[in-house]
Amino acid sequence: MVSNAANSTGEELLKGFIKGRIIDASTEEGVPYASIIIAQDGKTVGGNITDTDGRFIVKDLQEGNYLLTVQFMGYESKSLPVSVGKKADQNVGLIKIKPSDKVLDGVTVSSERIKVQQQLGKKVVNITPELIAGNTNIAEVLQQIPDVNIDGDGKISLRGESNVRVLIDNKPTQLSAEEALKSLSPELVDRIDVITNPSAKYDPEGLSGIINIITKKNNIKGFNGATRLSLGTNDKYMGGMNFNYRVNKFNFFVEANAAKRRFVNEKGFTRTFDNTENVLSQNQTVGENSGFQQYKIGTDYFIDSVNTLSFYYQYFKWQQEGKNPFEQNLEDAQNKSTILGNSTSKNINEGHQFDLNYRRDFKNGFLESDLWAMDGHGQFSTSNSQHEHGGTGTLNQRNSNFFTFQIFVPSFDYTLNINKKHKVELGYKGEYLDAFSNSENFNGSELHQFGYDYNGAISGLYSTYSTQINKLQLQAGLRAERASQTGIIKKEGQDTPFTYSYNSLFPSLTIVEPLNKKSTIGFSYSRRVRRPNIDQIAPFEVYSDPQNVQRGNPNLKPSFTNSLELSYNLNGEKYSLSVSPYTRLGNDVIRSYSFFDEQLQANVSTFDNLGSVQTYGLSLSGDVTLFKWWTTSGGVDLTHIDFNDTTYNIPNRPNMNTNFKWNNTFTLPAKFKLVTNANYSGYNYGLQNTSDPAYALTMTLSRNILQNKGNLSLRAQNIVYSGYRNHVYGLGFEEENFYIGEQPIYTVNFSYRFGNMKIAGRKRKINTQGGL
């Protein structure tokens, strides 16, 4: 290169700039925080990092020839010559960079470190082969992600708070979070957005935030597809396939997935009572058979270069059956009685989804409308029979519940990029639910019938404004919502109408400031809400067994929380680090609690607004490539909760809840990979309970086969495993519970991709992979 630092006359040359945008070569999405290096004659003369949309500008460059280099973790570096001429500026346009895939000593090392990216207002977890190795559903993948925890009952929590909103492609699900996550293959998922402080564009439901699972969008020409099969010990089977055919202006896609699994677990409790010497204990073998079916068909119509219309239909069915024999012992000072019994359960959830999406792209933005609907029905029933050991009398108890539901979610979004530094988003989203339930409960002597008609309506308007001030990036938003719950509670022939409605404002703010090419600091704030659902409101007594009852509370109110978070992110060539102190300040927080009912002689679980709750926490996560063959990552979440409630006396309550995750990827000879996932939770506490330390270790050995189009893996889940044990300090009783899941579980997994793998020239702008 020829240096042009000065001309022969000694006149100062014009100073210009180089600008452009860095995008992912496969997804064509902007790559944030990539390093831009401008060199001349082997010396660095300028540089910058990209903004959240992948755009950059390097100023104060004199006329001359330069070498522009793009660097970002997990991607191949890319260099290209550029010039600043007499016009004193150069727009290099789009620069595409590809995920790293280097060959070292005959061993392939893929882009293992690009798992987690910090973007404006959210943490993006990219689904890599190492992350999903051997996993049969997305719930198993979530177990590896920092800040996210799933307990022995399948309940998901984010930073210690179980009220988290789970979305699939920005849409809700009628299935429980556990059912939906276990029904989604990780092969179909592109990324997981963990949003602890969502912007005003998102529904504010979920005190701890949102977990948004984004499925893959196929932008490959011609015919292609994939198939997958999983076989596990003790009758666990799962399979699926998807096909895609893109020709001219149309794209057609078909998807089918099914599973059948059997689990055998152990659980039980020991309950002591205040002012008596009675001790009630129960040990139970939990035999569970579950399965699901999901079929989907749809099309995209590319009307022209800026207009796209899409439609899909999906059928789903989730079913679960359990047969659980138990032994129950009641002891007092003089006697001991033993009761033998058996409980059964059946859960079916079946329905249909429809989605119609239209998108129009403009030069400086886009307009998108989406109409999504779900229609379905289900039933849930339990029965218990028990008799005293050596006796002849039998006590029978049963519950049955039939329900229907219809959900309609319309949304309209408009985005305008005013210029390179200013962007405005406007939109509307509604969520309308119509549900009906008819139930009956037989408690051994009396039959009770009850049900409800329920209508829920949420309408929200939002606006966000994003700007860049020097290097500082700011996004502010406001969402206005009108929410209402109306219906009729039907109990013993009496109809009781109820109505509850409210208007609320939900502001949000996110600020990110790059410190240098490798690090950023940030601040975010959002106001969140937890709305009581109909099952928490309806004042019915539902028996899971004769000793345990759940009861709704018709006086529940929504609870609101203000969430604040600081963040520091560091990205090096072989490492990354994220540190986030946070706090949540909640009022009228909805919590479940338990007490012993003397009249029912049963433990009753119900809900109430328990005043203010303050949560303080610290989240740390990161990864590092220690050697060419070893990458390690992990995270720890520390949480302290002030319930401001003195009702429950918990002895030796800890001051901090601790959750830790550690993942490793080892590249072995002969193209094998070994992935280990370890989870640990400490001596933690809740409103009226503590839990003992728990840990689990899973290992997966995998290898690409069939010219890298196939993958074969062997997974050993819970090869080291503690189970779960907690202590409940209720009103009138204390209780110790335990749960031991099946261990170990061995699974063989196979996946294969086929057909044309050439990416189409025009990227699909819209989403065609809806959620359950």
Image: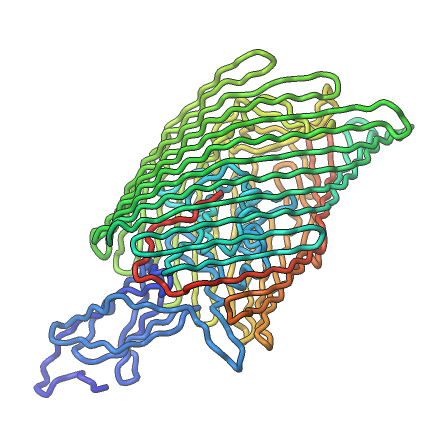
Residue 25 placement (x, y as % from top left): 35, 65
Quarter of image, res 729? top right
Viewer-nearest residue: 362 or 545:
362
Q: From this viewpoint, which residue is outermost toward the left?
A: 9
Please state which of residues 207 and 520 is positioned toward the viewer in this rendering: 207
Judged left or right of residue 756, residue 143 is right
Task: Residue 458: tell me if it is visible.
Answer: yes
Residue under the image location 59 percent in, 30 percent down: 379
Residue with the most extreme top position: 494
| Residue at left offset 29%, top offset 72% | 47
Colour convention of the picture: rainbow
Q: Position of residue 422 (x, y in %)?
A: 24, 52
Asked whether residue 647 appears in the rendered view, the answer is: no
- In this rendering, is residue 760 above or below 592? below
Quarter-of-image position of residue 130: bottom right
Side of 578 where 699 appears, left or right: right
Up the image or down, 294 lies above or below 341; here it is below
Comparing 248 with 312, the one in front is 248
Q: Residue at x 68, y 32 (%)?
A: 730
Q: Nearer the viewer, residue 215 or 143?
A: 215
Quadrant in which the N terminus is drawn? bottom left
35 over 163 or under it: above or below: below
Number of residue marks: 0
The percent coordinates of residue 69 (x first, y second) are 32, 75
- Residue 473, given in percent of the width and then of the height, sits at 31, 55
Q: Is residue 171 left or right of residue 650?
A: left
115 relative position to 64: left or right:
right
